[in-house]
Image (cartoon, rainbow, N blue to C red):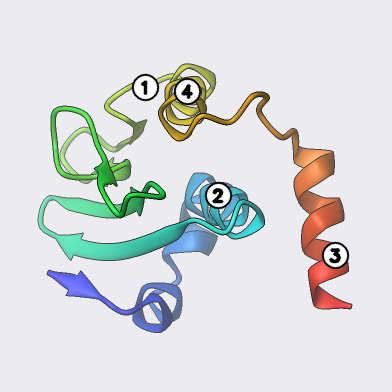
Amino acid sequence: MKVARALFESRKFPERFPEFKRFMAFCDANKLRMSFYDETPYIGIRVFDSSNEPITRYNQFTIHYNTMDKKIYVLDCEDWDEGMGMLNKALGLSEQKNDEDLISSLGSAIL
């Protein structure tokens, strides 16, 4: 079921799964549109490119937590770096922003 970002956050998914929080920060820093889902057995986020097309792989989410596997997948990869590399390539981003860049850009956005 598609849920609002506020509900996704009120259920504390970003706090329970730091990968979601990190992924949401990446998307916010890059001004990417996201939609949020809580569908048994998945908790997920779908990201859209500049053409408003969802960036997914074999399932319907860009990043998801599988409650049966108890694992986070980014574009169906168990490895964060591999999945984010694929996402950056799909988005046409020349280089992946590192955590310091994200913190810096988010900090300036708050001020």
Residue 71 placement (x, y as % from top left) = 32, 34
Q: Secondary structure at mark 3?
A: helix
The residue wearing badge 2 is 18
Q: Earlier in the sequence, mark 1 or mark 4?
A: 1
The residue that mark 3 highlights is: 107
Name the amino acid type tagged 1. Answer: Glu
Q: Secondary structure at mark 4?
A: helix
The residue at 45%/71% (across/down) is 12
Question: Disc 3 or 1, which lies upstream in sequence?
Answer: 1
Residue carrying label 4:
89
Q: Which of pointers 2 and 3 lies earlier in the amino acid sequence?
A: 2
Extreme residue toward the front, this view: 51
Tell me the mark number nearer the camera, choosing from 1 and 4.
4
Q: Label 4 near label 3: C-beta < 8 Å?
A: no
| Residue type at the position of mark 4 | Lys
Quarter of image, res 87 = top left
Structural crowding at the residue carrying mark 1, measured as other residues with C-alpha within 10 Å and reported as few (<14), some (14–19) or many (≥20): few
Helix, strand, or loop for circle 2? helix
Label 2, residues with CA under 10 Å away: few <14, some 14-19, many ≥20: few
> Callout 2, which amino acid?
Pro
Of label 3 and label 4, which has the lower sequence position?
4
Instruction: Name the element at disc 1.
Output: loop
| Residue that badge 1 annotates | 78
Q: Is residue 10 left or right of residue 1?
A: right
How many residues crowd mark 3 within 10 Å: few (<14), some (14–19), many (20+)? few
Q: Identify which residue, 88 or 76, lies in the foreground.
A: 88
Disc on the earlier residue, 1 or 2: 2
Q: CA distance from mark 3 to mark 4?
A: 26 Å
Report the amino acid beneath label 3: Gly
